[in-house]
Amino acid sequence: MSLIALVRDVSDAIVRCELTHVPRAPIDVEKARAEHRRYASRLAALGCKVVRLPPEPEMPDAVFVEDVAVVVDEVAIVARPGAASRRAEAHTMAATLEVYRPVVSIEAPGTLEGGDVLRLGRRLFVGRSSRTNDDGIEQLRAAVAGHGYEVRVVPVTGCLHLKSAVTAVGRGRLLINRAWIDASAFKDAECIDVHPLEPFAANALLVGDAVIHPGHFPRTRGRLEARDVPVVAVEMEELAKAEGGVTCCSVIFDRPA
Ligand code: CIR
């Protein structure tokens, strides 16, 4: 496997991050940085070449790089976040992705955040959410249709992004919180439910065969392990206060040959 993982260091400004579904709590920036360092080390240990985007000390949510890009094998889409405070994050993302893929940018009035895009093979499930609108979804569809990807829209109401509610944890296997989305969109997959006491636990990051998952969700981890999913637990409690999870701290894609 030859994977690139784009990451960006935690900004001091993270204490002013966007919050939608979690109450504001004081963030210990050094603790968040330590979590992020260990997360990046895990990615490296799982075989990723970790590439750092330029730091953006004034941009509170810049560590959550997933939201400003969607990368498939043939093309990279630079997103236009629904959160206006996050739009400037896209500049350095575009410059970095140009090294690896042809780049298409989502333009106004479209909005799209990568946290709303779940790729399962050649199918992209896209959350229509408070951050991603129909125009953004249509621009994404236009960018990938010629490469053989089908785009399916999933309404998201109960949480921030589609991938807050459902992520892949293996081939044909999903981790899901059915309370937040209509699970019928995923009826062809084997769905593993989060533990009811851990509604935020559906966000898992599949890297090769391993699944990176926040350590503070032991009950859901137990459910994954009971199904023989190889879980790598990482500390994420501080970044979770910024409504971040494990997918949102990286953009992972195959390295061009
Ligand atoms: C935001 O509200 O934009 C950030 N505070 C959290 C973004 C999390 N992104 C993700 O789950 N993909």
Image (cartoon, rainbow, N blue to C red):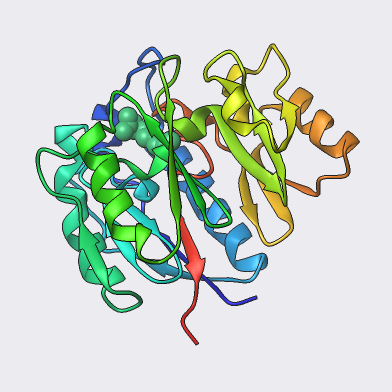
* Numbered disc total: 0
Q: Quadrant of residue 244?
A: top left
The single residue placed furthest to the bottom in the displayed view is 257
Q: Nearer the viewer, residue 168 or 96?
A: 168
Above or below: residue 21 compared with residue 3: above
Q: Position of residue 128 (x, y in %)?
A: 35, 29
Q: Nearer the viewer, residue 41 or 217?
A: 217
49 relative position to 197: left or right: left
Q: Position of residue 116 (x, y in %)?
A: 40, 37
Q: Nearer the viewer, residue 72 or 42?
A: 72
185 relative position to 238: left or right: right
* Residue appearing at x 62%, y 18% in the figure: 178
The single residue placed furthest to the left in the displayed view is 108
Q: Position of residue 185 (x, y in %)?
A: 57, 29
Which quadrant, please, contains the N terminus? Answer: bottom right
Quadrant assignment for ligand 1: top left
* Residue appearing at x 40%, y 25% in the figure: 160
